[in-house]
Image (spheres, rainbow, N blue to C red):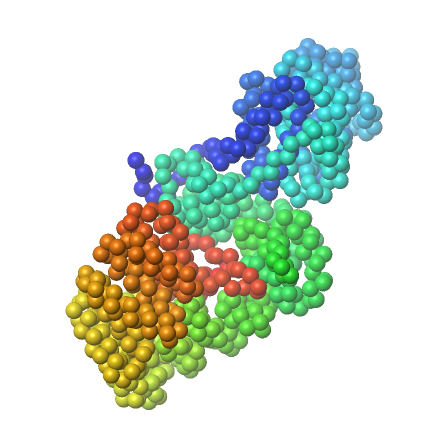
Amino acid sequence: MTQPPLRNSTGMRAPSLVGRDSELAALDEQVALARAGAFRVVLVTGEPGIGKSRLVNELAERQRDVAVVVGSRAFELGMTYSLALWVEAFERLLGSAPTAEVRRLCGSSVRDLALVLRSARRALGSGQDQPDPELYHDPDPEWLLRAMTELLDNLSADSPVIVVLDDVHNADASSWQALYHMARRLPDRPVLVLAAARIADLARHAVAGQVLAGLEQDDALVRLGLQALTDQSVAALTRAVLGAGDVPSALVSWLVGRSRGYPLFVIGLLRALLEQGADLAQPRLARVPESLAGRVALLVDRLEPPDRGLLEVLAVIGGRVDLDGLARVLGRPSDRLGVPLERLTRSRLVAEYEAGCRLGYEIAHPLVQDVVYESIGGARRRAFHRLVGRALAAAGNFGAAAPHFLRSAGSGDPEAVDTLIRAVRQAEERNLYQETLPLLAGLLDVLDPDDQRWLDVLEAMTWRAEWVTDHLVEDGAATAIAVMRHIERQLATSGDRLREGIVQFRLASFLAIGAGQPAQAAAACRRARELFAAGGHDDLALLALNELGWIRYCAGDLPGHRAFALDACEKAEECGDRTALIQSLGALGLVAAVQGRLGDADRYLRRSTDLAQAADKRYRYVWNLTMWGLALALVGRLAASRTTFERAMHEPEARDALTAEMFAQCDWLSGRLDGLPVRSAPAAGREPTSCLGGGVRRPSGRRTRSAGDRRAAARARLGGL
């Protein structure tokens, strides 16, 4: 039985190992080879947080009853004496062993081992007072190496030995050389060494590279690179940590996006959500959890100042940027960025992408990006955003520039307002309504209600925007209505009937569909029709007539909708207005489909589709195909419906139409549940994706929509953190 969505849970279970079945199977194979009599080394590599330590320790625990397990961990700046990694491992094992057992295992090398092992000194007895190893500066390396090898040989004489060496990228050179020496001297001993390392740091360790090459040449080494958990494994880990049979899908999606499948990050994010009493069905964190931020900061703090500055700029950009775009932001020649970018990519903090002749860069993990962004002081952050915004605007990409200007603008900022208005014009011309609405929200934040520049906003808005007549306001109706009211206020005494009519027409659409206020919508639409007719714009008056039908539809009055649409259709036929004819025929087709009159629906929608295709009105063409597919599904012709939807989905305009949502519903009607997540994804989160030559990372969490936090809401809608 599934559990309801969790809220304000306070308990976390110790996480079980999930999503690593194939890796454990590969390790089990190496265990079997070692038990049969072979010195084996497995190098487990991956990024910080990917689960290297968890995996090797899990394998060791599973074998503890049948093998001797020893282990140690190398720390940065912590390997200050010879053979430190092995000294720690053997001392942990022998420290609590009986004296006689220590003597037996150390064998003839007990005196040499006493130079570095307290347990060996203890085994020699009180008469053998050896100096502390930290004060012993010059033990003979060759003797110590032979002594360590003898100890490992004796340990493996009675049972297999598993040696866990964690973070070996920090190990001293002598510890690496000892590994190679032991593998060469004890090739037939049942020993398995599990060495875990970060890829980037290991690549900078010259001795480690030589040792690994030698082990590979001797066929004693296997490399096991860990990849991020799949979405299914993240869900399984979430269930295991929370002790729940089921968890909210929104939580899993959020964790996948924020953690990128790194188990340590999944657990850290879950812990932070629980500590803050967050709603797990609608997860959101204001900041990166301190535990995770600290881990990321350790990596970032090792960078040289120029490299860190470049990383900060990438964090502010917030997505993939091509080399030329990055050079424009920084005002430097691209050839001067090659060396620092190479260092950042080698550190694995930045990912490099190559497509043809273009190079792109972005911070490799969203949590790294957030930690770096949060570490930038407010003044510098604003300056960076302004630089990025100007570079994007100079390239003509006003939509991507807008969020950066919002993050750096004060009230009424001329440069920010101008960029936002230009972005509105671009979005409207391309019929990208999801970009238009957050841009309008941004303008509400930076422009006062009485600012005359609201009239410039109106000029930027396409008068025949398909997204308005198609009622695609989703949850942005309040924003759109507020903008129209501000513009209405500026036009109150203008006497400009056309522009007043446009504002009333848009208000009618937003009030009817987005706000659910059909009476107010009808009043605005009638006023728009009057203004259009008085100004001699009969074509727009026809669209307003057709819109009155849609308002009746919103009120549940199908006959009223049909009557208005039929009136608009007849008038459009008389005067030859193809635009009004296409839209009114589409409305008639939808009403017929809902009423079960498939013949009429097919006739109206087919003609509207043909007219739209002939007029190259791609958006209306897709809309008609979508309604046609829905009509077919409603009368049970599911195969024909699917074919029609697939035809619509081939068109780029389907991204901003209702096609994906309707297709998902028809999939559900036909029992094709496997397609629902794919069909529903576009509707669940459409965001602008343009940046300096690449994509913008989607913001996380739900948007704040209160009036007091409108600035944050507008900026979140536009992208970034």
325 in relation to 451, above or below: above
| Rendered image quadrant of residue 585 | bottom left
276 in relation to 621, above or below: above
Q: Where is residue 639 in the image (x, y as percent from the top left)?
A: 30, 53
Q: Position of residue 13 (x, y in %)?
A: 44, 34
67 in relation to 441, above or below: above
Please name the residue shown 49% across and 69% down the image: 399
In this view, the residue farthest toward the top is 100
Q: In the image, is 610 to the left or to the right of 12?
A: left
Q: Where is residue 180 in the image (x, y as percent from the top left)?
A: 74, 28
Residue 590 in view here: no
Q: In the image, is 565 to the left or to the right of 616?
A: left
Please name the residue shown 36% across and 36% down the image: 245
Residue in the foreground of this view, choosing between 108 and 257: 257
Q: Where is residue 71 in the image (x, y as percent from the top left)?
A: 63, 26
Residue 581 in view here: yes
Q: In the image, is 304 to the left or to the right of 237?
A: right
| Rendered image quadrant of residue 662 | bottom left
In this view, the residue farthest toward the left is 559
| Rendered image quadrant of residue 326 | bottom right
**Quadrant (top left/top right/bottom left/bottom right) for the N terminus:** top left
Residue in the foreground of this view, choosing between 496 and 648: 648
Residue in the foreground of this view, choosing between 340 and 75: 340
Please name the residue shown 65% across and 51% down the image: 345
Please name the residue shown 25% across and 80% down the image: 573
